[in-house]
Amino acid sequence: QTNINLKYSLRSNFMICSLCFNNDGSNIIFSSQQNVYVISTQNGSIIRKFDIPNMQESKENSRSIVVSPDSRYLALGSPNNQIIIYSMQDGQIICIFEGHSDCITSLLFSNDSNNLYSGSFDRTVCIWDLQTMKLIKQIQFGGNNMITSLNKDKFENSFFVGFLNGHIEIFNQFFTNKISEFKLHDKCIFEIS
């Protein structure tokens, strides 16, 4: 029998749709309707709070948040269809990407932290260059294939796209070749891990 003890708990007056750990596990990061919180995993204290711009009127929450492998960047899919890139060091906004026309559902950094992949209900995957802070490529998916999840293999040879209709499609690194496609579920794929 294993004993599990509660270390601490955080109370929130808002729905948390996404959270992530930083790379060494010392922080957990999540967002509210107007702020991003960086919390110590040691004691539950708030280490840093970032503002989410232009969110005073929004009732929506961010659905995707992720820290880059080198811990330089925090990417947040804001409810107004923008991707906000923050500096993890000081919480300042480095860049705001615009390119999606609907909810951003998934964010994924490349292993070297140079690229960011974003998936959206607008049926597109965008590849962003974090050195130039520009859009490299936008891949449009047809039909009613609203994108809900993105992931990649350890070596970045294959990228996985999960759809609202239960399908998964597998692509090569730059989405130039579809490797495979299959249906796993009758309903939404929320996360591919």
Image (cartoon, rainbow, N blue to C red):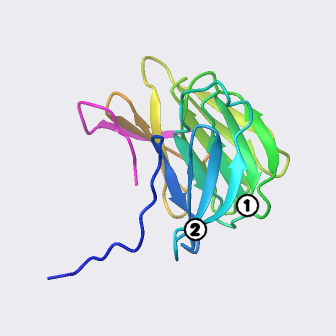
Q: Could you tell me the amino acid type at mark 1? A: Met
Residue at screen point 81% across, 52% down: 92
Occupied quadrant, residue 183: top left
Span shown in magenta: 175-193
As drawn, the label of residue 5 is: none
Q: Nearer the viewer, residue 76 or 70?
A: 76
177 in magenta: yes
- In this view of the protein, which residue sits in the foreground, 178 or 128? 128
**What numbered label is drawn on residue 45?**
2
Q: CA distance from mark 1 to mark 2?
A: 17 Å
The residue at the far top in this view is 143
Residue 53 in the image: state x and y as whole percent.
74, 36
Helix, strand or loop at label 2? It is: loop
Up the image or down, 10 lies above or below 54; here it is: below
In the drawing, what numbered circle is on residue 88? Answer: 1
Q: Earlier in the sequence, mark 1 or mark 2?
A: 2
Residue type, label 2: Ser
Q: Nearer the viewer, residue 53 or 111?
A: 53
Mark 1 vs mark 2: in front: 2
Circle 1 crowding by C-alpha within 10 Å: few under 14, some 14–19, many from 20: some
Q: Residue at x 70, y 59 (%)?
A: 113
